Image (tube, grey):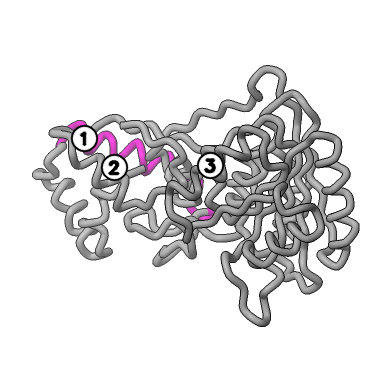
């Protein structure tokens, strides 16, 4: 079972696919930004990890910059110069439609603003509320070079490949998670040209938001970003369906028991090799512990990856 773009699927969805097999299948999960729960599974030895850390031939690192949203006029002027030079660009917003307080972060409002500044026929708009054929038509025009700028929500997070688009502007970047920012940034840098990702931030940032934006400036490494994401959001439930959040340890925490994890894993495998049905004395004891900690039903969820 191969799950591409694994971060876009929930535990229940992946488990449903695994359960279609008569016997538990081998599972290969692929993603540029592993889910905190999945990364945690590698720590406990439930998943093996392989890292492809080289870029496709000819691709350059993406330069990431952070700037304040109050410099919007300067950003728009630079965008106009980029388009005039034959380049294409994305402008990503966290909302489809705005409210009175958050109107500036809405894709529909921003597209209208940019059409006035850049020209009606140069700006396209896609978001999740549009019908499929309508979205496809706009994307086709952008891929063909008929549109210079594509204003969008996170619907363009994966599956968009336009090598001539070398500028990505993400508005209200502090509202996005690390994995989302990295996936969105990956829409540029798909050709041989120098690409830039510009993160527009608000004036009031939490310490967590500052940390996220700082990390995005520092690295293009998806696994390093995922490891920081795990630290910030927590691993979720190993024997459950939550893919991030606080870990539900009863008497310890991962850091304190790290040295025991390898021993426990080897002991568990030895038990399963000798008594796969957990019918013997040690197997029965393991069943009781799983029941007492309300994890007996959760063991099956490990198969989802």
Task: Find out whether the residues at labels 2 and 3 contact each other: C-beta distance under 8 Å.
Answer: no
Q: Residues within 10 Å of mark 2 (few under 14, many from 20)?
A: some
Residue at 52% from the left image edge and 38% from the top image edge: 159
Nearest to N terminus: mark 1 or mark 2: 1
Q: Quadrant of the N terminus?
A: top left
Q: What residue would you read off at disc 3?
A: 158
In the rendered image of this protein, does residue 155 appear above or below residue 195? below
Residue at 37% from the left image edge and 40% from the top image edge: 46
Judged by its main secondary structure, the magenta piece is helix
Q: Magenta part of the protein: which range?
A: 255-275
Residue sitting farthest toward the top: 57
In this view, the residue in front, 255 or 40, is 40
Instruction: Where is residue 151? Give x, y as percent.
Output: 65, 53
The Cα atoms of the two marked residues, 1 and 2, are separated by 8 Å
The numbered disc on residue 303 is: 2
Q: Quadrant of the C terminus?
A: top left
Q: Is residue 223 left or right of residue 296?
A: right
Instruction: Where is residue 278? Give x, y as percent.
Output: 14, 44
């Amino acid at each position: 079972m191969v799950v591409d773009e694994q971060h876009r699927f929930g535990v229940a969805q992946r488990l449903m696919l695994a359960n279609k097999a008569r016997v538990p299948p081998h599972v290969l999960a692929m993603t540029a930004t592993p889910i905190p729960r999945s990364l945690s599974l590698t720590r406990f030895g439930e998943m093996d990890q392989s890292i492809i850390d080289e870029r496709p031939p000819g691709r350059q690192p993406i330069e990431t910059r952070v700037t304040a949203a109050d410099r919007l006029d300067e950003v728009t002027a630079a965008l106009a110069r980029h388009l005039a030079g034959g380049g294409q660009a994305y402008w990503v917003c966290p909302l489809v439609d705005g409210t009175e307080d958050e109107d500036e972060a809405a894709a529909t409002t921003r597209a209208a603003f940019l059409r006035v500044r850049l020209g009606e026929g140069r700006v396209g708009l896609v978001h999740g509320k549009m019908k499929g054929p309508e979205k496809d038509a706009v994307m086709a025009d952008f891929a063909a070079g008929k549109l210079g700028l594509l204003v969008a929500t996170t619907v363009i997070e994966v599956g968009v490949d336009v090598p001539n688009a070398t500028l990505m502007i993400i508005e209200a970047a502090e509202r996005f998670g690390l994995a989302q920012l990295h996936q969105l940034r990956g829409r540029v840098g798909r050709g041989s040209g120098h690409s830039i990702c510009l993160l527009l931030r608000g004036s009031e940032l939490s310490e967590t938001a500052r940390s996220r934006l700082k990390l995005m400036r520092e690295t293009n490494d998806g696994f390093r970003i995922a490891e920081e994401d795990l630290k910030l959001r927590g691993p979720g439930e190993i024997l459950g369906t939550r893919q991030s959040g606080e870990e539900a340890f009863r008497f310890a925490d991962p850091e304190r028991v790290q040295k025991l994890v390898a021993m426990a894993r080897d002991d568990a495998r030895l038990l399963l090799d000798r008594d796969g049905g957990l019918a013997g004395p040690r197997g029965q004891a393991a069943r009781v512990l799983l029941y007492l900690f309300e994890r007996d039903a959760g063991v099956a969820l490990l198969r989802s990856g």
